[in-house]
Image (tube, rainbow, N blue to C red):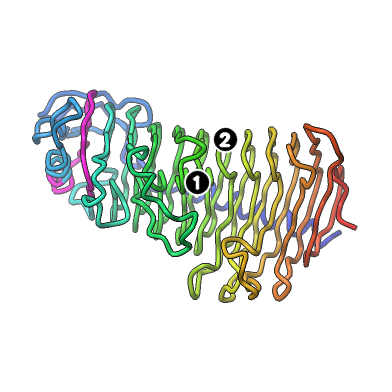
Amino acid sequence: MARASAIVVLVLCLALVSCEAVGRGRVGARGGGRSGGGRHGGHGGGRGVPALANQKIFNVVQFGARPGGEEDSTQGFMQAWVAACGYNGNARVVVPKGVFKVSELTFGGPCKGPAPIVFQVLGTVKADSDLSNYPDKGWISFQSIDGLVFSGEGTFDGQGQNVWKYNDCSTNPNCVHLPSALYFNNMKNSRISGLHLVNAMGFHIHMTGSYNMRINGLTIMSPGESPNTDGIHVSKSNLVKIAKTMIGTGDDCISIGQGATNIAINMVTCGPGHGISVGSLGKLPHELDVTGIIVKNCTLKGTTNGVRIKTWPGSDPSKASGILFGDIIMNNVENPIIIDQGYGDKSSSEPSKVKISNVVYQNIVGTTSKPAAVNLMCSKVAPCDNLQFNNINLKLTGAGSLSSTCTNAKASYTGLQFPRPCA
């Protein structure tokens, strides 16, 4: 019992470290002062946009972007970014109201002026549906920037309904994913807030190799049948906070990939979709460990899974540890609590070597549409250790009785337990 309590304290401490470190970051550190329109006219700071003194505005229309959604505005967006990033002062790129069609864009740093550089979206940015225009991983990419504020009330429409038919990942485990709507690589001390993302071709947001990042107040939506349209995927990143966001997709609302550490997820509403997942892990050789994952105060509605850890069979050794799922509401979820260490390749006879340990499930309540509310399918060569269940109260929406299934799992239980623990 003492050991289980220590695990709870450890995981909660990781959560506090993550939240406080993100809060102490340099995001918007130079905010305050008057809202300066610069020489290109005024745009107020707006919700989630810092008002910076003597700020110069770089409006994409003034660099050749054309509203209306028919003409290609890729070069206008790119030229506005190049000018803003190269400006030796406070800079803000503005996408005004209207519909703008663009293909692949990469906004790269480092930028010349002081942090943060602001990218404000007020209109709708629509993707070109010609896949030959996307040789890289993202539709719109930001990379190597220290101090970006990417916000506004605008919309990124990936037009995924035009290309999802080319996705063959359901039958091809080595498929090439369609481009992510927003791709963040090698970013630091940045914030993404207020935006709307709809119908991404692939992932809506893919973040990798980044440090001290906030995602707040987004709305992410795609149909429940859209393939591989994860809401937010985070890998190889440290100190990432995701909060107050609504996500409904055809895949995981949030997925945590290899090398993710100190990730805090709070007040996220998920559905439709496949739930909030750690993984999948172990598909690639020599994957990095995952640790310090906090998922709290979230609601899942009609999803296929609730909170899930998934790893591939036949993997190289790695670890997933220090994970807390707490204060979660399930509303008609098929598999509320699940660990699946045979994910992806059910035909493989080689067990997963991803070691799952020190996982806390705490105050998880609501309803499930299937009897097996807790399903722990752990690896026979790397059994799950130190799983703690504290106050689990789930009810079945249909006829029958709830059950728990446990394989190769070492768990302890305190407080209410519905369904009853594994024998």
Marker disc for residue 365: none
Reply above or below: 207 against 265. below
First to last magenta residue range: 82-106
* Residue to which mark 2 is pinned: 271
In front of the other: 171 or 363? 171
Q: Is residue 143 left or right of residue 191?
A: left
Q: Residues within 10 Å of mark 1 (few under 14, many from 20)?
A: many
Quarter location, residue 409: bottom right
Indicate which label's residue lies in the foreground, 2 or 1: 2
Reply above or below: 310 against 68. below
The residue under the point 69% across, 33% down is: 331
Q: Position of residue 389 (x, y in %)?
A: 79, 51
The residue under the point 14% across, 30% down is: 38
Q: Position of residue 411 (x, y in %)?
A: 81, 60
In front of the other: 391 or 175? 175
Quarter location, residue 7: bottom right
The residue under the point 71% across, 76% down is: 381
Task: Classify mark 1: helix, strand or loop.
Answer: strand
Which quadrant does the C terminus fall into?
Answer: bottom right
Q: Position of residue 166 (x, y in %)?
A: 36, 49
The residue under the point 13% across, 30% down is: 66
Q: Position of residue 208 (x, y in %)?
A: 40, 57
Q: Is residue 69 left or right of residue 340?
A: left
- Please check the rendered image and state whether residue 19 is part of the magenta-colored stretch, yes or no: no
- Please check the rendered image and state whether residue 89 is part of the magenta-colored stretch, yes or no: yes
Q: Number of callouts in the render? A: 2
* Residue to which mark 1 is pinned: 241
Reply above or below: 136 against 37. below
In whole angstroms, how far apart are the C-alphas of marks 2 and 1? 20 Å
Q: Amino acid at mark 1?
A: Lys
Q: Amino acid at mark 2?
A: Gly
In front of the other: 177 or 422? 177
